[in-house]
Image (cartoon, rainbow, N blue to C red):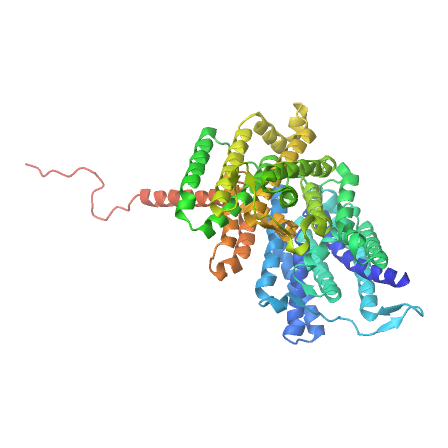
Amino acid sequence: MLQFIVLGLFAGSIYALASLGIVLTYKTTGVFNFAYGGIAMFCAYVFWQLRDGWGLDQWIAIPLLLLVIAPLLGLILELLFRLLSQQSAEVQIVVCLGVLAFFTTIVNLVFVRHPDDSVRNLSTVFSHGSFGLTSNVSVTWNEAGTFILAIVMGLGLYAMQRWTRLGTAMRAVVDNRDLAGLIAVNARTIGRAAWIISTVFAAVAGVLLSVQENLVTYVLPFLVIYSFAPAVFGRLTNLGLAFAGSLTLGLTINILQKYGSSGSLAKFETSLPYLALFVLLVVYGKRLTEVKSSLRATTSRAVADPWRGYVVGAVALILALVLGPQVFADSTVGALAQAMAYGVVAITVVVLTGWTGQISIAQMSFAGVGAFTTAHTVASLGALYFPLGVLFGILIAVPVSLLVGIPSLRLSGLFLALATMAFALVMDSIVFASASISGGLTGLDLTEAKLGPISFDTATSQYYLCAVALGVTGLFALWLRHGPVGRRLQMVRDSPNAAATLGASLTVTKLAVFAACAAIAAVGGALLAVTQQTVIPANFSFDTSLQLLLVVVIGGRTLISGAVIAAGFYVVRLLPVPATVNKYLPLGIALAVIAIAQEPDGIGRVMLNQFQKSAALLYRIGRRPRTPVAGRTSSPQAVRPSV
């Protein structure tokens, strides 16, 4: 048991460094850094490149990383989020998620050029070897050094905040930013210092974690997410509680390893940080308060003529039904069918994020519920029972959404996003990881589905099915938006206090929308199962939910057309496009999200605004009065000669 306790303290100390950095940034600047795992991974790969790739001495590589590269990243991030300081929490969260996608993509492009590079060994920065703690327990110098370094850095941060002028200024900014400005405390300088220190902590945590778990691009960000639960345990403001929570988490995980390294207990151990995060959010509830509230609400522009949306949608649906299968080859038709099924799920993101202000990073998890339920039903009862499988998927997705929504919808903004993220990760590590539910890595087959006498075993039939589903879902969503339900949603989003005063139940409204969107996502998942024919867990993971949110933000999170544009991004991945496009598309998505997250109507509105500005500039240039030529009369009339 003592050996597992030692290992738990060692792992917990790394989580402590990450949680301290997250808490410091949030309590000082009001930004919860969802990208912390990506930053830690990027810094770890940079250290590997400096020391192992280029052969620099370790004691040159470490100062370069901690004194140059990490602080420079901190300054860049501080500038980015300072420009967003007047934006809503929704915009800041979306940009953070875009930054996470950016660092993940950069690592894959720069450091992982071959499949063999996806896993790298990173040797310890401390001495090799071990020493005996007792006759039966040995401790490596890496474990001892990691624990001591975490204690020293934690105490150093506490001392800095407690007994230095910088720490006093940080506390003043946290307590009252406006009052701190009156006593000559520069909040901008304090923000820079907080971001630099936080990024340095991320770099140290990333390197130490990579020594323990190796450099793995698809693992490191999720391991850093382990530190989110201890940060919330400290209510995102208390460094001591965050440190203690990290050590407790590390101890608990390693003690569980003693009693089982496989089976249900192992799955529980993997999901424990996410379960702890969700439970803490629920228990704290409204006692969790955001450091600073949104200074400017993010709302979409009013639609002057709602019938135009209905007409455009109906015409687009008819054209898609008539022209699609006649114009494209079967392979392209199949890809378009998948994209339209994806678009059905994307519409739920528009309704939740764009219309009600609820950021959900779990919509593909609900789609997975519909997909796996439908696959099991068809496999057990036959293709004729496909509609029954869809119904079963809805009947499971709605109670699950209520299970998530009833406790978590009391939260808002940041904390609701954290709750849905925790739910998606729990679904990945427990539900979809179960072979009895998902079929394991190979998934489940759904090769045939029928709706009465109609069989959906060809690409064309699947295309028609998904086109009708997307069109009906989009038109139904438009009808809701421009009716009493839509007005209530806009009121709940723009002014929740006024909505409550007028008698609108915020919790009931949000819960109803959350459950309805889960049901529609389940339908979209069933359609994806039909078009993909093999349902695998990777297609409904947290990563896919994150990518779905990002492409909807680019398309326009307040517009149904945003969901259609998201489906367009999806189809690019399926078509035989040049390899360069697929290689750099994730980077383009990440940069686009960071650039246009402030615009709720997406890239179309940004392009329209730029066109209008350019047209106005050209008009002013054309209207500029000409300079009169010397010697000419200024009178417009010709001078008649005298007779």
Which residue is found at the position 54% from the left and 33% from the top? 477
Q: Position of 127 compared to 382: left or right?
A: right
Asked whether residue 533 is in view, the answer is yes
| Rendering quarter of residue 209 | bottom right
On the image, the x and y values in percent for residue 573 come to 52, 54
**What is the tally of numbered marks visible in this picture?**
0
Q: Foreground residue, 305 or 523?
A: 523
Identity of the residue furthest to the top in this view = 502
Q: Quadrant of residue 107?
A: bottom right
Q: Give residue 567's position: percent from left, percent from top.
A: 52, 46
> Relative to residue 220, is residue 384 depicted above or below?
above
Q: Residue at x 57, y 63 (%)?
A: 109
- Residue nearest the viewer, comparing 516 with 615: 516
Q: Locate the C terminus by quadrant.
A: top left
Position of residue 190 measured from the top left corner of the image (x, y, whole percent): 69, 52
Judge left or right: residue 459 versus residue 42: left
Q: Is residue 434 visible?
A: no
Q: Quadrant of the N terminus?
A: bottom right
Q: Position of residue 616 (x, y in %)?
A: 39, 42
Q: From the viewer's perspective, tell me whether residue 309 is left or right of residue 186.
A: left
In the image, is 348 to the left or to the right of 259?
Answer: left
Q: Residue at x 61, y 56 (%)?
A: 76
